[in-house]
Amino acid sequence: MYTEEDIRRLRWQSRRGMLELDVLFVPFVEEVFADLDEEDQDRFVKLLACEDAELFVWLMERGEAEDPDMQRIVRIILDRVQPSS
């Protein structure tokens, strides 16, 4: 279980310095993270450990993560900003 302090740290870690990532990650932590199940929260924490270049490719849908856990959390993030019609 993640505490408010943990979430504050994650919010800080979500600020990547690449605008395309920042506009996805920061609101995601602020608005969605606390409502995820614990496994998806863990996936997001693991995602934050990835390199920005890799994250950019996945989140701009120019490639997919080989790790199914990473692909799942990327999809959750993208579905939040690209809801199906």
Image (spheres, rainbow, N blue to C red):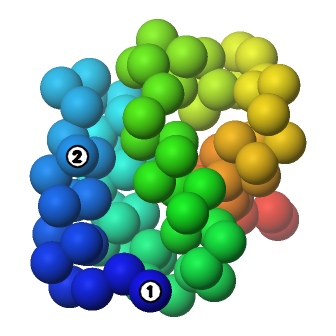
Q: Nearer the viewer, mark 2 or mark 1?
A: 1
Determine the residue positioned at 35% across, 66% down: 29
Direction front: furthest residue: 1
Q: Is residue 75 visible?
A: no
Q: Is residue 17 left or right of residue 34?
A: left
> Which amino acid type is shown beneath numbered disc 2?
Gln
Q: How many residues crowd mark 2 within 10 Å: few (<14), some (14–19), many (20+)?
A: some
Residue sitting at 24 percent across and 72 percent down? 6
Identify residue for label 1. Answer: 1
Quadrant for residue 15, please give it.
top left
Q: Which residue is mark 2?
A: 13
Which image quarter is the N terminus in? bottom left
Residue 29 or 2: which is nearer the viewer?
2
Up/down of 45 relative to 36, above or below: above
Is tag 2's residue or tag 1's residue first in the polypeptide sequence? Answer: 1
Residue 18: x, y in percent? 26, 23
Q: Is 28 displayed left or right of 46 in the figure?
A: left
Tags 2 and 1 touching, CB below 8 Å: no
- Residue at left offset 41%, top offset 47%: 24
Number of disc labels: 2
Q: Position of residue 72 (x, y in %)?
A: 77, 52
Q: Helix, strand or loop at disc 1?
A: loop
Which element is circle 2 on? Answer: helix
Separation of marks 2 and 1 at Cα, in angstroms: 18 Å
For residue 52, side relative to residue 61 (left or right): left
Q: Amino acid at mark 1?
A: Met
Q: Which quarter of the picture shows residue 38?
A: bottom right
Q: Position of residue 17 (x, y in %)?
A: 18, 26
- Do we see residue 83 in this rendering? yes
In this view, 62 is above or below 69: above
